[in-house]
Each structure stands twice: as C-alpha cells, then as structure tokens.
Image (cartoon, grey):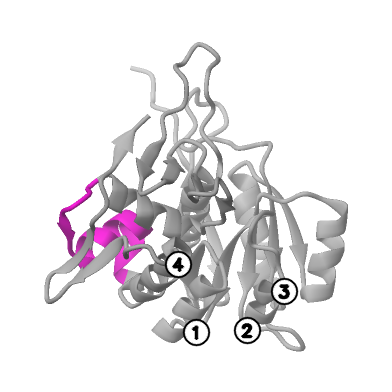
C-alpha cells in the first residue's frame, strides 16, 4: 500500500510570543492545498520591531499574499504612494508617531482596511481604535494563524460582492425615506445623499433593518456587528450605536433606534424591500 504524503512541519520562533508555535503546511506535491492562495492581494505590515515585522511578512507571504513592510509612519506613507494596498496591519506602540495617530490622519471613507496590532489589549485602546475607523484589533502576542484568520475575515467584509449581469436588479431596504443597499453596502438619506458607514456601523444597521420592531439584545447586536470575535468588543458596541444614531438623526424626525430599558434596542421604523 502506498504511503500517504507527509505534511511538512515548520516551526517559527516568535520573539514576541516567547514560545515555539508549530505551523503545518500541505506538502507541495499534494493536489489539495491546506489554504486558499490569494495571489492578487497586497498587504502592508507596519511595525517598528524588525523581528515581528519580518516574521509576520514571511508567514503571510507563505499563505499567498503579496506583502510589503514599513518600520514607521514615514516608510508607510512612502509605500502607499508607490502601491495600492487592500489591508494594513498597523502596530499601535511605535516611537515618534504611534498607530492611533497614523490612523487618525488616514481617510477612512476609502483606502485600505486596517487591523491594529498591539501589546496593549485594554478595552479602551480597542474602543479608541474602532472609533477612529479600524476594522479589527488584534492583541500581541497573537498566534499567527489568528492574525491570518482576522485578515481573511476583514478582506471578505471589505470586498463588494460581484453581481452577474443576469441577476435581478438590486434590492434596497427602505425605511422613513432612507434606503440601504445590502449588496453595495451603501446607505442613502432621504435627500439621496450617500452616508459613509464603517464596517461595524453597516453590520449593526443591517441587523436592525432585517429585524424591524423587534427588541435586539446587546449580545445579538455584538454577534451581528463583530462576528465571531464579539467577546472582545462588548463595550465598543456603545460607541458603534452612538455613531450610528448620530448618522441616522434628522431634524424634526423621530428617532429610528429606541432604547428598551433593561432589554436592548428596537428599530421602530417600517422596513420595505424594493
């Protein structure tokens, strides 16, 4: 009987984790890879620690990404002037200009997605990062496979769904003069003005309009707005809710999201499709 192909075992020594983390890759002669290569996606790793920077870049490159590195804000901006990136892994604790300062100066209505990466894992830092427009926050030390999973998740959410010309016309969710495009991830106010929403705000609003006039608990909204990593963002939901309410506010109009004391929140407007 022929022997089954053996999987190579590669061990990376991670200085930031102070442990040896075994990582398995399918041997090149096997027909089915263990992961899907994403050869057209370019990432930028920004970290002042050269060891972490190079190790992270090597790991992501082995998983099919095109990866560039930068040691700080100046190198990051120079790289962005030369290349277009789909996602940036941005260290928070850096000298001169830290990750939050860099993020604050970025245009978050477009451009690459951002995952903050930091040894500081306090709730307040996560909340500030999310409020500034970060798409996710990963605390160091992190298993490289967790970082990879977060990157894939953020990229899936950031990329618009492709629509075939043979598919029916796009359906909007309409409420109180507003219209939400779930496919294009766009919100238009009653004056037909496009309202910019962060990924978390869009997911939160979609959870409401898909369940109008029903009480949604905080846990339900956390699951809807942050997905499987919701347990890390239990306080950030208040930030997302506050920002969404402000964007939905209209002079003289009734509040669309009502607080139900000791229960959760309710989207009170009637929602129609079309």
Q: Position of residue 133 (x, y in %)?
A: 56, 67
Q: Earlier in the sequence, mark 3 or mark 1?
A: 3
Badge 3 density bin: few <14, some 14–19, many ≥20, Cα 10 Å: few
Q: Position of residue 50 (x, y in %)?
A: 72, 73
Q: Please give the name of the residue rendered at 49% of the width and 51% of the height, measured from the top-left corner.
A: 189
Pointer 4 with pointer 1, Cβ within 8 A: no
Q: Is residue 117 magenta?
A: no
Q: Earlier in the sequence, mark 4 or mark 1?
A: 1
Q: Which mark is residue 93?
A: 2
The Cα atoms of the two marked residues, 4 and 2, are separated by 41 Å
Give SS at disc 4: loop
Label 4 vs label 1, nearer the camera:
4
Q: Which mark is residue 48?
A: none
Pointer 1 with pointer 2, Cβ within 8 A: yes
Q: Earlier in the sequence, mark 1 or mark 2?
A: 2
The Cα atoms of the two marked residues, 4 and 1, are separated by 40 Å
The Cα atoms of the two marked residues, 3 and 1, are separated by 21 Å
Badge 1 density bin: few <14, some 14–19, many ≥20, Cα 10 Å: some
Q: Earlier in the sequence, mark 3 or mark 4?
A: 3
The Cα atoms of the two marked residues, 1 and 2, are separated by 8 Å
Q: Is residue 240 above or below residue 122?
A: above
The Cα atoms of the two marked residues, 3 and 4, are separated by 30 Å
| Pointer 4 residue | 251
Q: Please give the name of the residue rendered at 38% of the width and 74% of the height, measured from the top-left corner.
A: 236
């Amino acid at each position: 009987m022929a022997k089954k192909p053996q999987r190579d075992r590669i061990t990376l020594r991670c200085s930031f984790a102070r442990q040896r983390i075994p990582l398995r890759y399918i041997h090149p002669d096997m027909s089915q890879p263990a992961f899907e290569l994403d050869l057209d996606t370019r990432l930028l790793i920004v970290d002042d620690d050269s060891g972490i920077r190079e190790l992270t870049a090597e790991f992501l490159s082995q998983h099919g990404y095109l990866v560039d590195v930068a040691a700080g804000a100046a190198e990051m901006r120079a790289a962005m002037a030369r290349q277009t990136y789909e996602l940036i892994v941005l260290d928070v604790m850096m000298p001169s200009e830290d990750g939050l300062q860099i993020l604050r100066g970025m245009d978050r209505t477009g451009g690459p997605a951002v995952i903050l990466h930091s040894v500081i894992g306090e709730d307040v830092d996560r909340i500030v990062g999310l409020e500034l427009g970060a798409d996710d926050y990963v605390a160091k030390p992190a298993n490289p496979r967790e970082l990879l999973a977060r990157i894939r998740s953020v990229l899936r959410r950031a990329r618009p769904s492709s629509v075939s010309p043979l598919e029916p016309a796009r359906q909007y969710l309409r409420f109180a003069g507003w219209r939400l495009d779930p496919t294009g991830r766009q919100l238009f106010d009653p004056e037909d003005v496009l309202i910019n929403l962060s990924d978390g705000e869009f997911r939160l609003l979609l959870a409401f309009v898909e369940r109008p006039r029903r009480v949604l608990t905080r846990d339900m909204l956390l699951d809807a707005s942050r997905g499987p990593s919701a347990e890390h963002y239990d306080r950030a939901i208040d930030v997302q809710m506050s920002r969404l309410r402000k964007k939905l506010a209209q002079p003289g109009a009734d509040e669309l999201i009502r607080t139900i004391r000791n229960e959760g929140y309710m989207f009170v407007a009637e929602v129609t499709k079309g």
